[in-house]
Image (cartoon, rainbow, N blue to C red):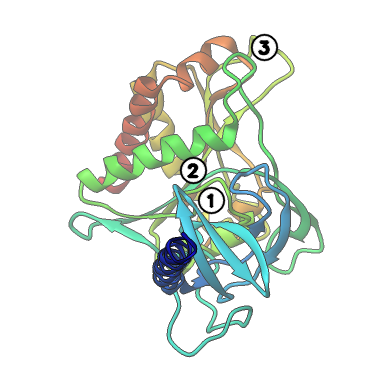
Amino acid sequence: MVTENKNRVLTFAVFLMVIIALFFCFGRVAYGAEKQMVTSGSNVRFRSDPSLDGNIIINLPAGTLLTETGRSGEWASVNYNGQSGYVNTQFIKEAPAGGSEGTTAAAPDTVPAAAFSATGGHIVCIDPGHQGKGDNTKEPNGPGSPVMKARVAGGTHGTTSGLKEYELTLAVGQLLKNELISRGYTVYMTRESHDVNISNMERAQYASRVGAEVSVRLHANGASNSGTNGALALAPSASNPYVANLAAPSQNLSSKVLSGYCAATGFANKGVQANDTMTGINWCTMPVTIIEMGFMTNPGDDANMANPAFQAKMAKGIADGIDAYFAK
């Protein structure tokens, strides 16, 4: 009986050793799956949780090396300087060999320069306004300006739908991107995620860097009077202290885009308004328009703009306006 018990113990011990060995083996395989990544944009948010509501532990500069340990949807779990957290997968890419976690590689551009093109036609930069969270840090209102403004505001929201402006602008921006590609344009997007921190100045500079022929900035309006509705466009005036030379072509672009948009959507056309206080206009080097697509404080405009089928009409109308501008 004693011998039999000893044999059972020995067998169990061998079994445990096999299990441990297998676990160690697969553990090493899993560990081997870890890879070095690098941030591909400035101010990449390293968060405590895989959510826009996760606390921001630190904003990482461009080119920071991280160790990715896993991925779920648009979030990657990473290690940075011995601390675990999460970053959006859009803003990391595989790192070149030779770096170590927490160091900085050669910094890429502020915004990832991703071109989407069908035939390499006219180059359009789409700027879906706002982002998941605003940034009240200051930046110059224009080149050499003593006036300082918040880098990027938080935006408005639908009082009926609850849709956030930054959600609306990106949804329409993605549809517009696809519509323009189908028409043969080369398209750049300043953002394709809500979890970014890209200032209005940086968005304009990005459009310049990628060689955009026009910059189309997507926004929505809000008003204290819920009865106010319709769409309008903003462009610099001839007396703009920074981009007066862009006034005429920008107003033309704005007029064409607004007309195409209102024709497609049936929204009231509130006209092109001169504005010389927008940082995202004042730093531009090409014709620029801000299309205020409707009033999110108006029940009718809001309900329409929150409808995905209607958003497709919105994108088509803007694309029609861009076609009209380049057909001049």
Q: Secondary structure at mark 2?
A: helix
Is 254 placed above or below 230 here? Answer: below
Q: Nearer the viewer, residue 292 or 65?
A: 65
Report x, y in % for residue 185.
26, 52
Q: Nearer the viewer, residue 19 or 192?
A: 19
The residue located at (38%, 36%) in the rendering is 256
Is 306 placed above or below 102 here? Answer: above
Q: Nearer the viewer, residue 50 or 243?
A: 50
Q: Amino acid at mark 3?
A: Ser
Report x, y in % for residue 276.
67, 48
Label 3: how many Cα within 10 Å (few below 14, some 14–19, many 20+) = some
Label 1: how many Cα within 10 Å (few below 14, some 14–19, many 20+) = many
Distance between the alpha carbons at the discs numbered 2 and 1: 6 Å
The answer to whether mark 2 and mark 1 are in CB contact below 8 A is yes
Residue annotated with mark 3:
226
Q: Secondary structure at mark 3?
A: loop
Label 3 vs 2, first from the N-terminus? 3
The residue located at (63%, 78%) in the rendering is 102
Residue annotated with mark 2:
251
Tell me, for residue 247, which label it has, or none: 1
